[in-house]
Amino acid sequence: LGAHCEAAQPIPASEFLQRQRQLALALHELNASAYIAEPGASALFFGNISDAAWHLSERPLLLMVSPLAADGEISAQVTVLTPYFEETRAKLLNVPGVDVSYVAWREEDDPYTVGVSALPISNGGPIYVDGMIRHFVVEGFEKVTPGVKVLSAPLEITSLRERKSPAEIALLKCVNEVTVLALRAVQAQMYIGIRESQVIKMVDDALAAAGVSERWALVLFGENAALPHGTGTDRVLGISDLILIDAGGTLFGYHSDVTRTFQLKESQIPEDHYQLWWDVHAAQTAAQLAARAGVITAEVDKAARALLIGRGLGPYFTHRLGHGIGLEDHEAPYLRGGSDDVIQTGHAFSNEPGVYIEGKVGIRLEDCFYIDGDGKPVYLTAGVGGQAFDPLHP
């Protein structure tokens, strides 16, 4: 396991500079003054500032990017707004960029007044903010810029993070592949009579051995899996129980999310549970066949749902088909009914249909995929076999 991702590399500084320039170009086209994000996925994408590297508090630290026009060229002005007493620590964040500036606010200052003083807002263009920014930060900027709108970033900006680069896809592939390998390694160690908590520890150990960070696992046996996110019990594995493991973690900030429902060699699974497993597998396949660049995301959800409805299982598929994945485990866009988002090259999603019959059984199969340059879906787990092969071979 440890060797699988040992050659993986973090996103290079050159790619951060390219992202910042793309953001500046989008802001210029939108006649916007700036884009602002708190530590988190978007600040990590544009400025290498994660919420792990800088925990959120009542004192704002903000990544601010503005477009600069000079000699017919558009470039990114990158500014970090930081508490004054934390300025030295802020400068250790290793924010990539050309001439990154740090603007510090003292405890007696209004941080938003200090922040706005560093932004080129003379044109009155809107300030766009990351969709996950806290409301008090938005209110702070609204108060000190009465003639300027403070708005959530539009698709022209959010799509920059939604559509993954080859370097991002490479990391997503590696971390999702090694998560599948970890689950297979755990299956080989399991036995009838083991507890859910023991398996959680085994999954964590396997992912840790693989070099995966921010690890997590959901382990559910038998009817416990009929609640998609579990019951909080510590059930013992019985001979007739299917095993559901939903697990993931990060590699250089990029997430894996894999679910397998499987059996052991010595298991004696009821025949109707086997049939349900194959029904869910067929729904996953139907969704994958429907996913293409240019298709509305709701249509992919519909493809999986229609198959299960046709087999009388519609009421037991109780959640959306999937979510975007990247620097967040769950991010836009989503594969769900009612969505009008359009799938584009570079998008990455989970494909995770399920059937949940309370008091009886729960089955979910999940692999993430991306849309390649030809507009076709490719499983991020394809390098280790892609979809689960059958209930005994996850």
Image (cartoon, grey):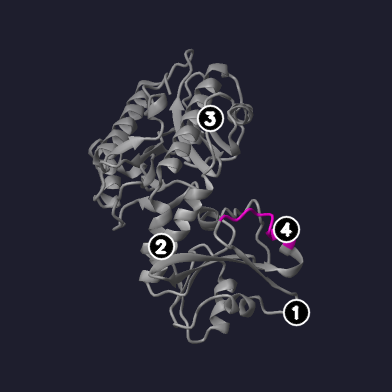
N-terminal-most mark, 2 or 1: 1
What amino acid type is highlighted by mark number 1?
A: Glu
Q: Marks 2 and 1: CB-CB under 8 Å?
A: no
**Residue nearest the viewer, comparing 329 with 153:** 153
Question: Left of 322 or right of it: where is 78?
Answer: right
> Which residue is painted at 61% across and 77% down in the image?
112
**Residue nearest the viewer, comparing 17 with 113:** 17
Picture layout, residue 354 above or below residue 160: above
Q: Marks 4 and 2: CB-CB under 8 Å?
A: no
Q: How much space separates mark 2 and mark 3, taking CA atoms?
A: 31 Å
For residue 89, the mark is 4
Where is the C terminus found, in terms of image quarters?
Answer: top left
**Residue nearest the viewer, comparing 84 with 204:** 84
The residue that mark 2 highlights is 157
Q: Position of residue 299 (x, y in %)?
A: 25, 49
| Magenta stretch: dominant secondary structure | loop
Q: How much space separates mark 4 and mark 3, taking CA atoms?
A: 30 Å
Picture layout, residue 215 above or below residue 159: above
Where does the magenta region start and end?
88-96
For residue 229, the mark is none
Q: How much space separates mark 3 and mark 1, taking CA atoms?
A: 48 Å
N-terminal-most mark, 2 or 3: 3
> Which residue is painted at 26% across and 47% down in the image?
293
N-terminal-most mark, 4 or 1: 4
Q: Is residue 93 highlighted in magenta? A: yes
Question: Left of 89 or right of it: where is 241?
Answer: left
The residue that mark 3 highlights is 7
